[in-house]
Image: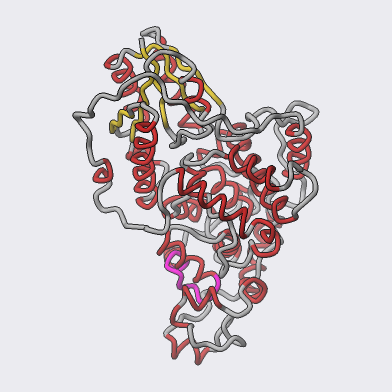
Amino acid sequence: MNKAVWFRNDLRTIDHPALSSALCSKNRVFGFYIYTPKQLEQHHVGKVKRHFILQNVVCLKNELQNIGIPLVIVRGKTYADSVKKLEKLCKTHHINEVFANTELELNEKKRDTLAEQALAKTHTQIKWFNDQTLLPPGTIMTDKGSPFRVFSPFKKSWLKQIESQSISPLPKPRKPNQNIEPDLEEQDILKWEPSQPQNDYWKPGSKEAFKRLRLFLKEHANDYHTERDIPSKASTSQLSPYLSIGAISVRSCFYAAFQANEYRWDFGSQGLLTWINELIWREFYKNLTHFNPNLCKGDAFQSKTSLIPWSRNEFILNAWKAGETGYPLVDAGMRQLNETGWMHNRLRMVTAMFLTKHLFINWRMGEKYFMEMLIDADFSANNGGWQWCASTGADAAPYFRIFNPERQSQRFDPQGEYIRFWVSELANIPNANIHNPTENQRIKCHYPPPIVNHKEATQRTKEAFQSIRLLEAP
């Protein structure tokens, strides 16, 4: 009998727990990948990321071929289809053990339970491994045995736990003693999404991910704490697309930073410590997803906020989507997103808080749009970020904390470099006015007036939160 590795959101061979364990056996090993576009659409995953997924599946197939493992790629529609496809693949290739890394979202958990039950009927076992977080969900708990709701104590406990853990990535997979038969059914899977936009900036594959990691650690990591909020500079790691589809493991990222910081978690390079802090935020949001499945159903973490009478004004929502709000920094961020499928993290906060607290649009509508447009769309990070900005989530920004877009612009894009690049009609506006052009300048440049008044809009939001007595502890 043979073994199989069921690849999902872990499209790599390096530091892959399920693959590493499967290769410990002398049996023949297959790789399976089941593409489910309808399920991705139901999760609001857009064309840019779907194309990126398929590109990385091609890279994975080549990586596996180099170590003598065939990757069988099939297409279904939904997760229910994927279970049936998996059953058929196991029967066809005489599989008695499937190795897979767990996923934390609600529908993914349901799929895996169904797969486990279906394969058990044919005496085929699935062995599960942790991969999406460095420490398995449930490792970091309060003294009362409950999940943390606030980041700071979560981080403190996380750092205490990690000191006793070995975080070295798994060794590179060895080549098993098996031959790959010619793939008589090889398909050009990139044609499965025929109208995909091309995005040459995000080259697929683990090699590219590790190249970016090395470049970041060499050239930007030590200054990360001072430059990460400047959108005109390429000073962030830009690894999020690769983490989102598992082309690189979070363990590899943690270990590389830990190693670069001379094996220290609590002191050393402030830039590296700040980047490690961002990775721990990722762990925090993944834990929230695991312990709060209703987040995957669109529920707010703070249930009281369900009483907020959010607007669903399509006109102003569409102006925000198009980058036509009349607030230069907000519009620059949205245009970057629309053109590249990616947005600088500072701008994600600025644009999300603008939608929720200036335009008073339901955060779920912004969350959905980001999922549709982002090449690094990741449910936990996206949901956590939106609920933080909307003051509905765990350890969220206080409802009265509202970014002033003009001040954000003056602080993080003082010369208007980022604005001028993405809002080209403002290219010739002088520095004194780039953050808020005069009425005459807007008319000449064909740039819209501010869609809302900052003071009036934020006051309305504060009153709405106060009306549901959010001053009380959750």
Q: Give the percent coordinates (x, y) of residue 12.
A: 45, 36
Q: Quadrant of residue 198?
A: bottom left
Q: Is residue 240 left or right of residue 158?
A: left
Q: Residue at x 35, y 31 (%)?
A: 33
Q: Is residue 308 left or right of residue 165?
A: left
The residue closer to the viewer here, 279 or 177, is: 177
Q: Is residue 368 left or right of residue 411?
A: left
Q: Is residue 363 magenta?
A: no
Q: Give the percent coordinates (x, y) of residue 171.
A: 55, 29
Rendered view: 289 above or below 355: above
The residue closer to the viewer here, 201 or 446, is: 201
Q: Is residue 80 visible?
A: no
Q: Give the percent coordinates (x, y) of residue 196.
A: 30, 53
Q: Residue at x 71, y 31 (%)?
A: 140
Point out the stretch of residues depicted in magenta. Answer: 319-329
Rendered view: 434 above or below 210: below
- Please name the colour scheme applied to the rendered image: secondary structure
Q: Quadrant of residue 138?
A: top right
Q: Is residue 327 magenta?
A: yes
